[in-house]
Image (cartoon, rainbow, N blue to C red):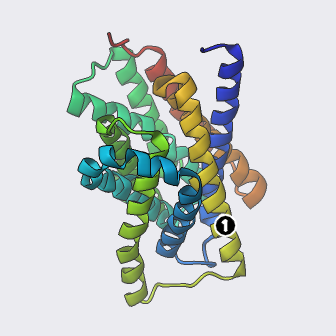
Amino acid sequence: MFNAGSANRAYLLLVITTLCWGGNAVFGRLAVGEISPMLVVALRWAGAVLLLLMFARKKLVRDWPILKPRVLYLSTMGAIGFTIFNALFYAAAHSTTALNIGIIQGGIPVFVLLGMFLFYRITITYLQMLGVLITLTGVLLVASSGNPMVLLQSDINKGDLLMLIACFCYGAYAVGLREKPDASAMAIFTLMAIAALITSLPFVAVEYFSGQFQGPTTKGWFIIGLITLFPSFIAQLCFIQGVAILGPGRAGVFVNLVPVFASIFAVILLDEHFRNYHALSLALVLGGIWLSEKFKRVES
C-alpha cells in the first residue's frame, strides 16, 4: 500500500539515481586520455551484465517465455538507448565539458515529449509547448557557449552536437519502451544490457582498426569500475524501484536533477568554470521542463 514512508524511500532512491547519472558526465571527462570511448561503452556493459546476471538471472529465466518473442525489439532498444547513446556520450566528452554534457542531457524529456506526440498523438498543451521551446533555448544557449550567433555560422562545438544527437537517441529509446512486454523491469533491463554489450563490439572494432583504440590505463580501469557500479548498476536498480513506487510519470520528473548534479560535480571535481550562460541555460532547461510537467494534460 502506498504511504508517506514508501514515498520518502522512492524520493531517496531517485535522488541516488540522478546523483549517479550526474556523475557520469564527470566520469566521461575523466576517461579522456585514459581509455578510448568505444571501449568504455563495451567494458561498461560487460561489467553491468556480469552484475545483473548475479542478481537478475532468475527473473530473466522466469520471464524468458514473455521476452523471447520480443528479443529483436528489446535488443534494438538496448542498442539505441544504451550503446549508441553512450557511444555518443563518451565521444562528446573528448571535445566538450562535463558542464555542457550535463545541461544538454537535461533536454532529454523534451525529445521524449515530442516523440510521444509524433508517434502516439499524446496531446501537448500550449504551456507544455512553451516549456519545450524554453528548454530547447537553454540547450542551444549552452551549445553556442552563450552566443546564439554561433549557431547561424554552423560553428557549434562538435561535442555539444554529439550530445544533442545522443539526447535524441535516448528520447527515441524512452518512447520505444512504451511497447515493452509485460515482464519484470530487471529482466528487461538485463536483456537490453546484454544487447548493448553485443552491439558495442563493432564500435570497438572500428575504433581499433581506425587507429583510435586505447586500452585502459590503471586510472582508466578505476573509471570503468565507477561507471559500471554507479550509473550502470546502482542507478538502474534505484530507478526501477523508484518507478515501481511512484509510477513512471512522477519518477521521471526527478531526471531534471541530472544537469544540476552534473554541474555541481563538474565545478567541484573538475574545476570547470561555471559561467553566466551556464546558469541561464540551466534555469531555462529546468524551468522549461517544470512548465511541461506542471501543465501537462492528464490522460484518462
Seen in the picture, residue 221 relative to 165 is either above or below; the reply is: below
The image shows residue 266 at horizontal and vertical percentages of 69, 53
Q: Nearer the viewer, residue 226 or 281?
A: 226
Classify residue 221 by image quadrant.
bottom right
Q: Nearer the viewer, residue 147 or 203?
A: 203
The image shows residue 34 at horizontal and vertical percentages of 63, 78
Q: Nearer the viewer, residue 47 or 263?
A: 47
Q: Which residue is mark 1?
A: 225
Q: Amino acid at mark 1?
A: Gly
The image shows residue 40 at horizontal and vertical percentages of 54, 70
Q: Secondary structure at mark 1?
A: helix
Seen in the picture, residue 208 relative to 257 is either above or below; the reply is: below
Residue 285 visible in the current orientation: yes
Q: Residues within 10 Å of mark 1 (few under 14, many from 20)?
A: some
Query: In which quadrant of the rendered image does the C terminus lie?
Result: top left
On screen, residue 222 versus residue 289, left or right, reads right
Identify the residue at the far right of this view: 268
Residue at the (33%, 16%) spot, across then down: 126
Residue 156 visible in the current orientation: no
Tag count = 1
Residue at the (57%, 84%) spot, across then down: 215
On screen, residue 237 versus residue 208, left or right, reads right
